[in-house]
Amino acid sequence: MPARIPAEWRISLVLLGAAAFALVAVTAQSWGEMLHQWWNIDTYNHLLLVPPIIAWLVALKAKELGSIEPRPFIPGLALVIAALGLWWAGRASGINLVAHAGAVGALQAAVVTVLGLRASLLLALPIAFAAFLVPFGDEIIPPLQFLTADLAIALTHLSGVPASVEGIYIDTPAGLFIVAEACSGVKFLIAMVTLGVLVCFTRFERWSRRVIFIAACIIVPILANGVRAWATIYVAQFVGAEKATGFDHIVYGWIFFAIVVAALLGAAWRFFDREPEQYGWTAHSVAQWDWVQRSEAARFAPTGAAFAIAALAAIAALGTMI
């Protein structure tokens, strides 16, 4: 409830909202492109869950945040400048991935600048997790197609079905199969990596377990997609290619991967060593770091920080008109 939020936090959050509005207004084209991809391209539908996840992660730190006072971190303006520069470069070169990364990075930098270093350290996970708002993965589709084809042909031979492969084309007695972009497994891989990062930093404390789990979130989806492609080819030998392909999208496309996710999380469950609300650093631990205290020696008004961000956004807007 707003009435329960300390006055200094209410002021800082309003100013952060104003700064964010200015940045989004300037980079609106990039945000519009990202929203289109989240909503209309099934590879990125899972990104619609990222904002609620960020809100949940922030809510878990509400008590810790209430124990500190937000103090603007003016060096964070350098991050805002760098992010807006990245966005401008992406727009100028026509590389959407770069422009999108800059647009998201500008908001992340604004949080660090307006709320301060201490608050940002407490919110390090949700701030970093916002990077997943950037739609990425198209770049790895071609290699994933070839890898899926290799896995599928190997399993097809092991199952006794005669077949030959040329690139992403697999020829079998039931017909010719193509590992299309939609069959590359990129959607499941990206979603699993996103989930893996969230689980790693909310449920694991040891880095060794984090590395193993994130590696599993990369390897298992790739192998599972190869099995899915092989299963489609194998079933087609008995029911025909058309029926097998339709069955693949309904059963293997959803049920099979749901089982894989459940199995992966189930295998990791017994190794979870902390609760989600224990993620990250505490206000007490951050307070012990001398370098954080030194960074707060110079005091700046939140209004000045927000105004500076708005000014930088205006300059970036002018830069696109030149």
Image (tube, rainbow, N blue to C red):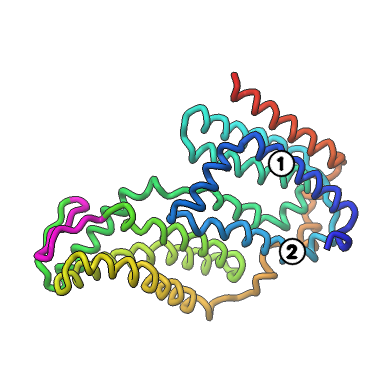
Q: Position of residue 36 (x, y in %)?
A: 51, 47
Q: Is 90 above or below relative to 110? A: above
Count of marks, rendered view:
2
Dot 1 alpha-carbon crowd within 10 angstroms: few under 14, some 14 to 19, many 20 or more = some
Residue 26: image location, x then y, percent: 65, 34
State the residue at coordinates (58%, 58%): 50
162 with respect to 185 (left or right): left
Q: Give the secondary structure at mark 1.
A: helix
Q: Position of residue 265 (x, y in %)?
A: 49, 74
In the picture, residue 226 is in which quadrant? bottom left
**Residue at the limit of the structure toward the top, as seen here:** 322
Residue 169 seen: yes
Q: Assign the C terminus to one quadrant of the image.
A: top right
Mark 1 to mark 2 CA distance (whole Å):
24 Å
Amino acid type assigned to the residue bearing label 1 in the image: Phe
The residue indicated by pointer 1 is: 21
According to the picture, the residue beneath numbered tag 2 turns out to be 61
Are the residues tagged 1 and 2 within 8 Å (C-beta)? no
**152 relative to 3 in the view: left or right:** left
Quarter that holds the N terminus: bottom right
Q: Which mark is residue 280?
A: none
